[in-house]
Amino acid sequence: MAMKKIGIFIYEGVEPIEIAIFGTLSMAKRVIPDLEMFLISESGGDVLLANGLVVKAHHDFASSPPVDALIICGGPGWPAQVKNTKVLQFIDAHRETLTASVCTGAMIFAATGLLDGKVATTKASYADGEADPFEVFRERFPKVGLNRAAIVDLGNQVTGGGVSLCIDTTLHVLAKLYDEETADKVAQVICYDVARAANLRERGIVAGTR
């Protein structure tokens, strides 16, 4: 298999469970040895995630190498990122690249304008006392339609639901970069094949424009 590079965009306040994106790709190397993945943040180095976990980004925006896919993480830090012009410009620069968001990362994706007139998904469930992410999305980004699917696939643009669906979305990205058989093998390696089948059966993958 040809080498593919996947960049994972993180920022202050990303939900730590979304680091499962990196973990899924790490396990995927058992099936795809040439796969390369790395964390990208605006400034590189240490990034404080939600609830105190610190991880180190491999690259900042300037040093990030070209990627075959870019995945945007979600988490409670998203409101600051939708107002960060450097972040939005970085994502927009990848408009011809396979770009995926997970959970509330769709808010950041939508803030670029790249999803206008199209359909997306985002985090659908929430705890008592929290705002409904779907309603927040509708209010902030009225030009983007919403679907409560597990994954919305618009070709080079993919949005995934929250938060554990980061695994399903990552597997979907692998299927697009390689093929479904490869993604299925990775799901089996990480003991996620049953969960993936259930998520897709219950929520499905949606394609198309608004």
Image: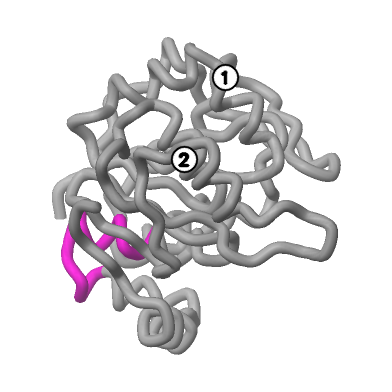
Please give left or right for residue 133 compared with residue 131 in the image: left
Whole-percent x, y for residue 119 in the image: 31, 52
Please give left or right for residue 176 compared with residue 138 in the image: left
Residue underneath mark 1: 83
Quarter of the image with the N terminus in it:
bottom left
Name which residue type carries label 2: Ile
Please give left or right for residue 138 compared with residue 49 in the image: left
Q: Is residue 6 above or below residue 111?
A: below
| Residue under the image location 78 percent in, 55 percent down | 130
Whole-percent x, y for residue 84 in the image: 55, 17
| Residue under the image location 58 percent in, 29 percent down | 57
In this orientation, which residue lies closer to the viewer: 23 or 152?
152
Q: Is residue 159 above or below residue 151?
A: above
Q: Nearer the viewer, mark 2 or mark 1?
A: 1
Q: Residues within 10 Å of mark 1 (few under 14, many from 20)?
A: few
Q: Does 181 appear in magenta?
A: yes
In this orientation, which residue lies closer to the viewer: 125 or 157?
125
| Residue under the image location 30 percent in, 56 percent down | 173
Q: The magenta stretch spans which residues? A: 170-182
> Which badge, 2 or 1, comes first in the chain's sequence?
2
- Residue 175 occupies quadrant: bottom left
Residue 23 visible (yes or no): yes
Whole-percent x, y for residue 5 in the image: 30, 39
| Residue under the image location 48 percent in, 12 percent down | 86
Please give left or right for residue 111 compared with residue 164 in the image: left
In this orientation, which residue lies closer to the viewer: 46 or 85?
85
Residue underneath mark 2: 72
Q: Residues within 10 Å of mark 2 (few under 14, many from 20)?
A: many
Name which residue type carries label 1: Lys
